[in-house]
Image: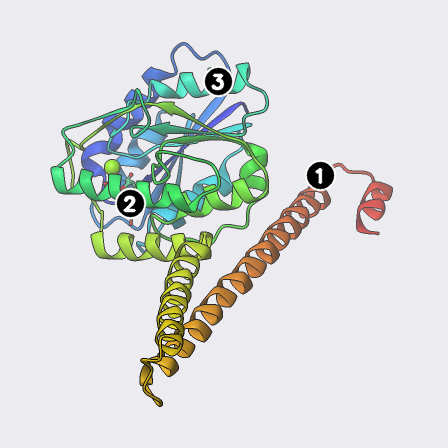
């Protein structure tokens, strides 16, 4: 299998058929083997029935379904586990992105062997958005700008669903997000493991049918927390340097008063300066500890990756008994 396309669906009865048809159309020039995996994330409308009807007459379409709505992260993880393709694409069910880009993803992978993960990017130069409501767009752009600071590579669109992965990337990651944060989780972990990411410009359109499941508060909080975890020095460093700097300045002022003979004994300013200096040093130390923890996390990710690889190897059918032993020892 060369290509798997994973589409999470929560209450997308209005979109399912049209979207699946459009995705298949976009692959008409693709001559490899592919599968489309529609994941029904506990829809309460008749998404599941619609999908069953389509899949009954189309072998390329597979349905995975569970009864409780958990979130797009869970839906994507479920789909990824099911995917057999060497390249795995995720796209949303409302056609916010034109599936024609899938062919571009494949072309890029072919031409650039060193690239492991491709992002469709409306926010990079050359990319565009059309008809996205003003507030939603503004929040999304601002969020991506902040996140951009937190990530090692300067990526413009970190939160988009439309992406393509080489199988080895997803096979290496132990993912746990249930919601929209999954896009960040994948990027962060994949980059920590040294996988290479490329953005290609794309147009993001507003959904035409069905309703968006975007939850502002939840998304904003989870993404902010993520930035702090990803680059703790942004917060600790900033506040620490500020506090320390203020302490030193006040200290200098006190010293000036002392030498110009103006200092009345027992002024609280001295204590204040000392408090600020000590506080600043402490906040910076938190930052350094957080950096250490981050590098430990990288190590853990690497170990998880090796574990997963080992697990896959042991599970491979038809493997020689002695090979298994070698892998275990
Ligand atoms: N989705 C899902 N489970 C959820 C919420 C959303 O599977 O709990 C799917 C949804 O059906 C869509 C994709 O995730 O295919 C993105 O959702 P949506 O279009 O509502 O979000 P937006 O594109 O506005 O961020
Ligand atoms: Mg959408």
Depth check, front residue: 250 or 37: 250
Q: Is residue 209 visible?
A: yes
Give the farthest residue toward the bottom: 266
Q: Which quadrant, please, contains the N terminus?
A: top right
Vertical arrangement, residue 270 with respect to residue 224, above or below: below
Quick check: marks 2 and 1 in contact, CB under 8 Å? no
The secondary structure type at the circle numbered 2 is: helix
Horizontal side of residue 130 vs 73, given as left or right: left
Foreground label between 3 and 1: 3
Q: Quick check: 250 above or below 85?
A: below
> Which residue corresponds to mark 3?
108
Q: Which mark is residue 188?
A: none
Please name the residue that numbered disc 2 is placed on.
Answer: 143
Q: Residue at x 45, y 48 (%)?
A: 185
Left or right: 236 as drawn, with respect to 94? right
Relative to 284, 261 lies left or right = left
Q: Quadrant of ligand 2?
A: top left
Mark 2 or 3, closer to the camera: 2
Circle 2 crowding by C-alpha within 10 Å: few under 14, some 14–19, many from 20: some
Which residue is tagged 1? 317
Measure the alpha-carbon separation of dots 2 and 1: 45 Å
Q: Earlier in the sequence, mark 2 or mark 1?
A: 2
Q: Secondary structure at mark 3?
A: helix
Tag 3–tag 1 contact (CB < 8 Å): no
């Amino acid at each position: 299998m060369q290509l798997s396309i994973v589409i999470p669906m929560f209450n997308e009865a209005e979109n399912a058929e049209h979207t699946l048809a459009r995705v298949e159309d976009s692959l008409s020039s693709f001559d490899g083997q592919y599968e489309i995996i529609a994941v029904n994330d506990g829809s309460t409308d008749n998404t599941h029935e619609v999908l069953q009807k389509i899949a009954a007459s189309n072998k390329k379409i597979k349905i995975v379904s569970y009864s409780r709505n958990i979130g797009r992260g869970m839906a994507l993880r479920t789909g990824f586990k099911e995917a057999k393709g060497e390249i795995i694409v995720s796209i949303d069910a409302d056609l916010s992105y034109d599936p024609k880009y899938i062919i571009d993803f494949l072309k890029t992978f072919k031409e650039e062997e060193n690239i492991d993960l491709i992002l469709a990017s409306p926010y990079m130069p050359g990319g565009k958005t059309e008809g996205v409501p003003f507030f939603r767009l503004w929040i999304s752009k601002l969020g991506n700008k902040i996140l951009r600071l937190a990530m090692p590579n300067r990526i413009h669109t970190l939160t988009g669903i439309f992406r393509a992965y080489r199988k080895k990337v997803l096979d290496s990651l132990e993912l746990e997000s249930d919601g929209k944060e999954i896009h960040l989780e994948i990027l962060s972990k994949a980059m920590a493991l040294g996988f290479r990411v490329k953005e290609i410009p794309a147009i993001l359109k507003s959904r035409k049918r069905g309703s968006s499941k975007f939850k502002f508060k939840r998304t904003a909080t989870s993404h902010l927390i993520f930035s702090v975890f990803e680059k703790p020095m942004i917060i600790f460093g900033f506040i620490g340097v500020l506090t320390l700097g203020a302490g030193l300045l006040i200290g200098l002022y006190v010293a000036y008063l002392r030498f110009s003979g103006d200092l009345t004994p027992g002024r609280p300013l001295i204590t204040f300066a000392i408090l600020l200096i000590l506080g600043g040093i402490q906040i910076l130390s938190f930052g350094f500890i957080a950096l250490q923890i981050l590098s430990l996390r990288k190590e853990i990710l690497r170990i998880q990756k090796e574990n997963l690889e080992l697990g896959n190897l042991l599970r491979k059918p038809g493997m020689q008994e002695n090979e298994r032993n070698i892998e275990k020892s």
